[in-house]
Amino acid sequence: MAVTISVTVLLAIVAILLIRARRTSLGAAVVLWLSGFTTASTGLADPVNTFLAAVAHLFHH
């Protein structure tokens, strides 16, 4: 659970920085944010969580 919260906060910070640096628009960021919710409700949720756990495990050691 802590990894998920950390990744969420990290991605939110990256999104805010990209919007402030004019690398992406607010509309595009909202669309991507909402697509995350739709992805979480599909069969892709487990593979995404497994991938994020593997990445976190790489950085942990």
Image: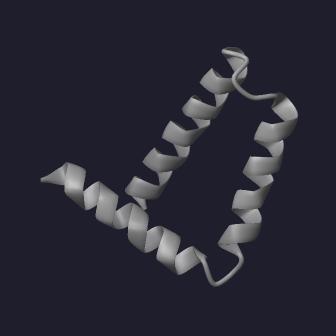
Q: Residue furthest top?
A: 21
State the residue in front, 22 or 17: 22
Q: Which residue occupies 74% across, 28% down?
A: 24
Quadrant where the N terminus sits is bottom left
Q: Is residue 57 above or below residue 41?
A: above
- Left or right, 44 with respect to 46, comes to right
Q: Which residue occupies 51% across, 79% down?
A: 46
Q: Is residue 57 above or below residue 31?
A: below
Q: Is residue 25 above or below residue 42?
A: above
* Residue 6 coordinates in the image, percent (x, y): 44, 46
* Residue 36 coordinates in the image, percent (x, y): 70, 59
* Residue 4 coordinates in the image, percent (x, y): 47, 57
Q: How many marks?
A: 0
Give residue 14's quadrant in the image: top right
Q: Residue furthest right?
A: 27
State the residue in front, 4 or 54: 54
* Residue 43 coordinates in the image, percent (x, y): 63, 84
Q: Residue furthest front?
A: 23
- Left or right, 21 with respect to 55, comes to right
Q: Residue furthest left?
A: 61
Q: Which residue occupies 41% across, 62% down?
A: 52
Question: How did the renderer colour the structure?
Answer: one colour
